Amino acid sequence: MASTVALVTLEDYLATSYRPDREWIDGELKERNVGKWEHARVQALLAAWFVQNETTWGVQAGTESRMRVSPRRIRIPDVVLVPTGPQPEVLVDPPVLVVEVLSPDDSYSDTQERAQDYLEMGVKAVWLIDPKSRSGRMCLENAWVLASRLTVPDSPIYCELETLFAQLPSRQNP
């Protein structure tokens, strides 16, 4: 028997708080994979690095903010950088940077779909950081590049992954 999905209007979605928050994709509510400790730690370290450089880079950092990537989709990226200045409750203009920190439960296809939504919105740079493999990728001209230094083209914005991952505890064998 086929399951039925109850669609939610944009107005109802925006008027409701979910714990944890959910994305709105073509009228459906989609649960986000809530990260575990390393995910949360990488997200916090990135946000701290970005906040430390906000004035120099002319940006503001935010975490887990609703972002309208198209008329039918609202995503909630892990970290965003937006130009300095007032921002709406739901971001509608493309951020300078979107960062997704992979959680153990993220699938490749879901991650690629999310990244494609950001790129189609006009986001200048998308980074994917994987705490498990201690690696990162950035999208350059629609191609994913593995890199130890993530950058935003035509800007001073960067992150040295070796420095970031050095702030994580060393792995312990179970």
Image (spheres, rainbow, N blue to C red):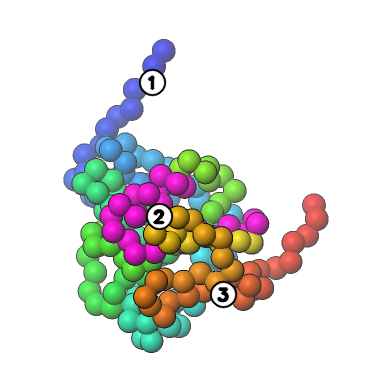
Three-letter code, disc 1: Ser
Hey, which residue is sitting farthest right in the picture?
Answer: 173
The mark tally for this picture is 3
Examine the rendering and report whether any part of residue 18 can be seen.
no
Examine the rendering and report whether any part of residue 88 can be seen.
yes
Residue at x-position 28% and y-position 55%: 121
Give the structural element (helix, strand or loop) at label 3: strand
Three-letter code, disc 2: Asn
Query: Which residue corresponds to mark 3?
Result: 160
Q: Which residues are magenta?
A: 111-133
Report the mark closest to the observer, 3 or 1.
Answer: 3
Q: Which mark is residue 3?
A: 1
Where is residue 159 drawn, in percent x and y?
A: 52, 74
Residue at x-position 34% and y-position 54%: 118
Where is residue 89 drawn, in percent x and y?
A: 24, 62
Q: Earlier in the sequence, mark 3 or mark 1?
A: 1
Q: Which mark is residue 142?
A: 2
Comparing 97 with 147, the one in front is 147
Report the mark closest to the observer, 3 or 2.
Answer: 2
Structural distance between the alpha carbons of marks 3 and 2: 22 Å
Q: Residues within 10 Å of mark 1 (few under 14, many from 20)?
A: few
Q: Which quarter of the image is occupied by the N terminus?
A: top left
Q: Residues within 10 Å of mark 2 (few under 14, many from 20)?
A: few
Comparing 73 with 122, the one in front is 122
Above/below status of 163 relative to 137:
below
Residue 118 within the segment the image draws in magenta = yes
